[in-house]
Amino acid sequence: MSRNLNTDNLDFRLSRRGFIKGCTMAAAALGLSDSMIPRLVEAAASPLRPPVVWLHFQECTGCTETLLRASHPDVGRLILDLISLDYHETVMAAAGKQAEDVLKDTIHKHQGKFICVVEGSIPTKDGGVYCKIAGQTAMNILAEVAPKSAAIIAIGNCATYGNVQAARPNPTGAVGVGDLVHDRPVVNIYGCPPNPVSFLATVLSFLTFKRLPPTDQLGRPLFAYGRKIHDHCPRRGHFDEGRFVEQFGDEGHRKGYCLYKVGCKGPETYNNCPVARFNDVGTWPVGAGVGCIGCSEPHFWDTMTPFYERLPSVRIPGGQGVTAEADSVGKKILGVTAAAIGIHAAVGIGRRLVKGKQETEES
Amino acid sequence: MAQRIVVDPITRIEGHLRIDAEVEGGRIRKAWSSGQMWRGIEVILQGRDPRDAWLFTQRICGVCTTVHGLASVRTVENALGLEIPMNAQYVRNLILALHALHDHIVHFYVLTALDWVDVVSALKADPNKTATLAGSLSDWPGNSPQRFKAVQEKVKALVESGQLGPFANAYWGHPAMTLPPEANLMAVSHYLDALDYQRKACEAYAILGSKNPHIQTLAVGGVSLAINPDNEATLNMERLYWIKQLAEEVRDFVQQVYLPDVIAVGALYKDWLPYGAGVTNYLAVPDMPLDGKGERFDLPGGTIFDGDLSTTRAITGFNDPYFRDNVVESIARSWYQGDWTKHPYEEETVPAYTDFQDDGKYSWMKAPRFQGRPMQVGPLAQVLVGYALGHELTRKHVDDALARVNALAGAKVGPEVLHSTLGRILARAVRASMLADLALKHWSLLVDNIGRGDLAIINPPEFPLGEQRGFGFHEAPRGALSHWIVIQDGRIKNYQCVVPSTWNAGPRDDRGREGPYEASLVGNPIAEPERPLEVLRTVHSFDPCIACAVHMLDPGGREMVRVKVV
């Protein structure tokens, strides 16, 4: 996987040249044609609070709810001070025809200038009848709104790739925004739901630096999805040194040991959960005692299940740099030798050797 | 000649709902409620590990996050006859209570207040008079003239900016909006306060659930939340105390702001008390179990028929056949193949979309029935059943709230007034007030249990060969929720959900009997058919959740879902 963090985008001096260059870089990172760049520039430079049109399709509204959990900015500050949330079916006062009129008016009046946020997947089978709003299919609504937007943010897995309704056999042909929209930037905020900070920082990046953040090949902003959970997990030391929870409620669980053996998918999941944490109370699944379920990876409902079973081929500290099952490691007793230290350094796992379970230090 | 109105989308709900109504003589004569989205998660759970089911089902809804997870683990536990440790029970009870508090606060202020409160009228209010009004309803220290003035300035700036955002093109100045400007300003200020307090309720239960929306620490057999007062990386006293502090702040908001605001709206809009009764059969399930098996509860459940409290019969526990054997669903008017009415264990689901047919099929929702009767579920059912069963906490809170409405309105109404749109809104606030007290009670129960040295959190499940059937219920913020499972050799064979918003928002059944939304709209006044604010008032009073309501999970065990578009 190429994870190309383009450091030129970190030039914060907002000269017009730097500004255009930033937009150009963002456009290039997103694989856009040059014709998109003037639109991005224009949208970002307007003195109005940027208009936002938020569409809901096949979704559970968890991504809207995740926004209600944010405190910086909280949703009140967001919609009163920072953006103009012109269309959002969960919070808007207008309904029915009054709401339809708002959507039509906004996308025409602010054509080329509004940010379109999409929550929910789009069903494509049978003419898309599985999601209709005001008599229009989700497909048609997206086809009408997307081309008029300056940029699109797909929030949550339903919008990025389809999510639970797209798991086998995907009866409604549910797809993500990026499967249907190819001519303008789509930033994909993966997660089920995502941490609101990942979405908000993307929006703030646009408002403040007049550019969309650099993303990986899935369209995920690198500032949030640049590392695996495993690579910045506070329990990594327990993993490296062989201290594992064998089952929920055991001694190791009560000591906060590594959750790999009860199914943690941290080694295969890119996200910022261990550092960003959730709900302003420093909590996250591993910190509470349950493994990561891999919810920011595409098709995780199929690739990361059963959730409570361990991943089959994660390299854990063992002998001779080969993949080993955690419990077979536990049975080995490893001597401390310079050669063994060298091997472990070579696989980049850690400097301490794993000892057998009988020799594990109590901590 | 009747005029047909269509409100689509109904906003300020969860999901995609369309409401049609025939209006004649300024009143609704007939109505249809239609779910407009289907995800077809029909066969996804088939063949999977039952321990995973709750993580999938929780994604049925992110507004009602937690509820489908809780119902699911209870369902699998029921199938296995598995009891859970008391710590796990108290943790679950705390999560469900705190989540309901968040949900009800958001419902009143964000989802429904704008049907009754005119934001633009708040600009004409006198902040000092507003403080006097607020002070007459509550001792809340956040009700100062300075605060109201600051809020008014904010609204003014918003209106002058020309970018009203979510407040654009709404029902300001509608003839049905009759609150004085001071009441409107007070409500707008409390709306902004509510955004903070709903978040605090979520912070409190995030400590237990590891995050929300979509908690991750439930488990079949208990919870996966590590508890150890003597460790820094587990649930310890610092984390527990934080929950208590937040829960106290939320309780104070609910009891000193939310409930008084609802009482004020009820009293000031007393002309609206006659509208929105609809189906007066009620169903609620008991919740907040006080044991590991689900035989004793802190909140009662049961049924009432025809609005007659003397017909009340309790639902006694997690294995009560009175509940298990009397639930069916009809697809006669729903976009599925067939016309049957079946028990959840027997259902199958093959989608068959037609366009909206007034006298045919018109919704993705099914029509649940109890002993063949349509039932209204939700806080009104919870409160009426509790009242009728003599539940002390319910009686105390209901009587107190009604006394305050009477004092303010110069009226003498009793519980019979609750069969209405405003009654549903008041019942929800009363329920929230009860849950605010119960959350702190169950916090103490949890801490006392840990203090006795009990750190057990889970009885790990074992799945024997052969078939097991189970059902699990939860009295969710929107009403009685149940899941139904058939397990075969340790794998899911069938799975079914019968969801509160389906009970309420479902279409007519095979005998043409309307669902609760449809029935409650009949008789509602409509002042301006092109701006049907009154439809929103009644529909919102149910707190719709349509992703929940559209049937998700199929027991049919098919590999391919055949779709027939007619």
Image: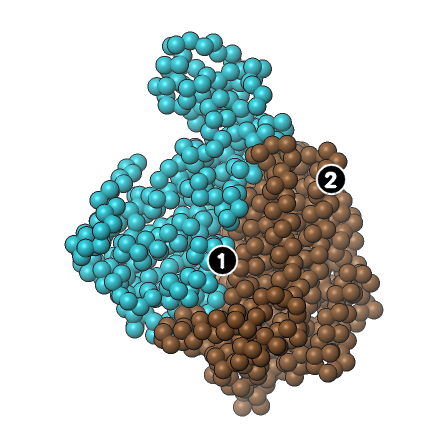
Chain colours: A cyan, B brown
Looking at the image, residue A231 sits to the left or right of residue A263; the answer is left
Judge whether residue B235 can be spotted in this image.
Answer: yes
Instruction: Give me the C-alpha separation between circle 2 and circle 1.
Output: 33 Å
Going by the numbered disc 1, the residue's amino acid type is Leu
User: What residue sits right under mark 1 in the picture?
Assistant: A68
| Residue at (50, 34) in percent of width and height | A264
Looking at the image, residue A86 sits to the left or right of residue B466; the answer is left
Judge whether residue A93 can be spotted in this image.
Answer: no
Q: Quadrant of residue B268?
A: bottom right
- In the image, residue B432 lies at what x, y percent? 66, 61
User: What residue sits right under mark 2 in the picture?
Assistant: B449
Mark 1 is surrounded, within 10 Å at the Cα level, by few (under 14), some (14 to 19) or many (20 or more) other residues, namely many
Q: Secondary structure at mark 1?
A: helix
Q: Closer to the camera, A59 or B287? A: B287
Chain of the residue displaying label 2: B
The vertical placement of A40 against B55, above or below, is: below
Chain of the residue displaying label 1: A
- In the image, residue A46 lies at what x, y percent? 26, 66
